[in-house]
Image (spheres, rainbow, N blue to C red):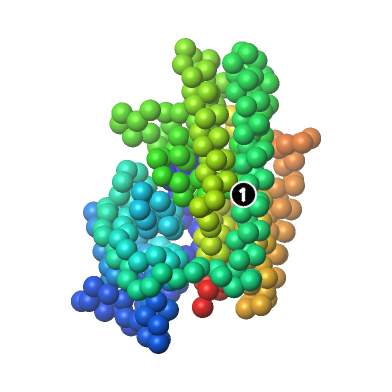
Amino acid sequence: MTLTHGIKTGTAAVATILAGVSLAACTAKENKSADSSTKTPAEITVNASDTQCTLSATQSGTGPSTFVITNNGTKVTEFYVYGAGERVMGEVENISPGLQRKLIVQLAEPGKYQTACKPGMIGDGIRGDFTVTGNAVAVDEKAEFKEAAESYKRYVNSQTDALVPATQLFVDAIKKGDVAAAKAQYPIARTYYERIEPVAESFPNDLDPRIDLREADLEPGQKWTGFHRLEKDLWVSGLQPDTNAVADQLVADVKELNDGVKAPDWTIDSTQIAGGAQGLLDEIAASKISGEEDIFSHTDLWDFQANVDGSQTAVASVRPILDSRNPDLGKRVDKGFADVEALLAKYRKGDGFVLYDTVTEPARQELSRAIDALSKEVSQVQGVIAPQ
């Protein structure tokens, strides 16, 4: 899962020169237009350390807000913007010490929000209040943005539609005691989740950790559920007295995700889509390259492919906007995806992949370099396609 993964220092950072932001003021400087709801805010710098999360401004106008996060601490960190009910409005993860990342968030409604840095990528993080003023604005109203959002939402719906029955097959095999069938179904069911994991992270009530938390990221007293708990039961511990209950909970959780993305009020905007494309590549760079994700089953390459598929589809959803603004970037992104796909194809075996523990360290580094090169290009997409 992305909320609590490790790091990959090779992930490309966004090199941004920060200027025009007053550290003394509590509001970002803005370029004012006739309508206060359409002000273009300056970038808000975020100084993240192991003990602090200091923003150069704690207020902005409605519309897009740009945060530039620098990790000056010793631990990998994350940065979140939360709306009412702990809804994740935007996030950027796996920021290694010394690196800088940019996040663009569409804050369409005035009101109270919260920001959070999460050193070590655990817990509630270092929270702060953030105020959005001005008139409510419509996000992605133009045809190109609306179509991007609708296209990606259709993709998300298709993946959760497949996730529920695939997970049910996985759980049914577990409850029958058919360990071999459950092992075979495990990476297949996860594929549909891994393609859209950033969407799950946007829902409150710890939905993503319930589905995908790794044992290494458990906090004291936290109940371990989800795919990876069942993975350990199947490959290491043997079926446990509570395995069936954990399996039933997993089905309930993926159904909750499916219901959530089908709800009329669930929306996703083009900047979130582009951010998710980057987040999926971070998934690979942060924990899958090292083999930390599927540490018991070694089915990491299925997750690799799913993350790449999801990232590529997310970029494709916003591609008309990208091509109209920066077609050269689109071509570089295409090449990056093609290079990664060619490398993954080397490890195909039947309908799946070889186990990751059979992949040599030099081969892993080759994959890592290709992912880093692709990530460098995809990291630029959000800034290019953000509504202007």
Q: Residue furthest right?
A: 350
**Amino acid at the residue labelled 1:** Val
As drawn, 334 above or below 169: below
- Residue at x 71%, y 53% (from the top left corner): 341
As drawn, 209 above or below 263: above
Q: Position of residue 178 (x, y in %)?
A: 65, 15
Q: Position of residue 356 (x, y in %)?
A: 62, 37
- Residue 120 located left or right of residue 313: left
As drawn, 209 above or below 66: above
Q: Position of residue 321 (x, y in %)?
A: 63, 72
Q: Position of residue 240 (x, y in %)?
A: 49, 14
Tally of numbered tags: 1
- Residue at x 45%, y 46% (from the top left corner): 203
- Residue at x 42%, y 79% (from the top left corner): 38
* Disc 1: CA contacts within 10 A as few (<14), some (14-19) or many (>=20): many
As rendered, which of 118 and 107 lies closer to the eye?
107
- Identify the element where label 1 is drawn: helix
As rendered, which of 146 and 296 lies closer to the eye?
146
The answer to whether residue 268 is seen in the rendering is yes
Q: Which residue is mark 1?
A: 156
- Residue at x 38%, y 33% (from the top left corner): 218
As drawn, 86 above or below 41: above
The answer to whether residue 48 is seen in the rendering is no
- Residue 11 located left or right of residue 334: left
- Residue 134 located left or right of residue 381: left
